[in-house]
Image (cartoon, grey):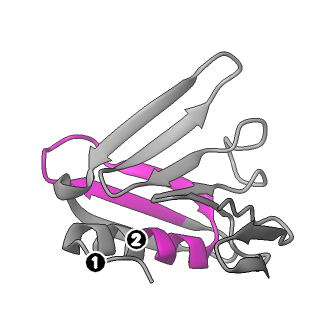
Amino acid sequence: MTVYGTGGIVTGGVGGEHQVPSHALCTMSAEKYVFKSSRLTAGNFLFPLRIEVTPQRVSRIKPRLIGSDEESISISQVASVSIRTGLIWSTIQIDSTGGTDPIVSRGHRKADAIQIRDLIEHFQQGLPKS
């Protein structure tokens, strides 16, 4: 099943078709969740940053004209997730227990930032996502 969020699309999957809410700025494929930052925020106009959350890792992918930059932290190595909200957009910071630089992503909606945090917590606990 694939879900794209900007405006809501009807998607098919097990159990038929359903409408995706317009605020869901993510793509789901099996156990991979992809969240795109807004193009209206600094540094994201041409190539919006993506956060990918899987049961194994959290990745920050910054596309470029040629290629992309990727940072990853294993789910078991995530120490904390901080969300800072502004007037419109939120910034999410994912800290690691390994002493590496945190993953920081700006320009997400508050609901998306909360969903990223909740997914990480579910994957750390080994619970299935409902």
User: Which of the 4 image quarters holds residue 64?
Assistant: top right
Query: Horizontal and vertical percent for residue 30?
Result: 50, 58
User: Which of the 4 image quarters holds residue 80?
Assistant: bottom left
| Residue named by callout 1 | 127
Label 2 Cα crowd, 10 Å radius (few <14 / some 14-19 / many 20+)? many
Q: Is residue 7 visible?
A: yes
- Taking the image as shown, residue 83 lies to the left or right of residue 67, namely left
Q: Amino acid at mark 1?
A: Leu
User: Which of the 4 image quarters holds residue 89?
Assistant: bottom right
Q: Is residue 19 visible?
A: no
- Taking the image as shown, residue 78 lies to the left or right of residue 81, namely left
In the displayed image of the protein, which residue is found farthest to the top? 66
Q: Amino acid at mark 2?
A: Leu
Distance, label 1 to label 2, CA atoms, is 10 Å
| Residue named by callout 2 | 119
For the record, the magenta segment spans: 91-116
Query: Horizontal and vertical percent for residue 81?
Result: 33, 67
- Taking the image as shown, residue 26 lies to the left or right of residue 100, namely right
Question: Which mark's residue is nearer the viewer, 1 or 2?
Answer: 1
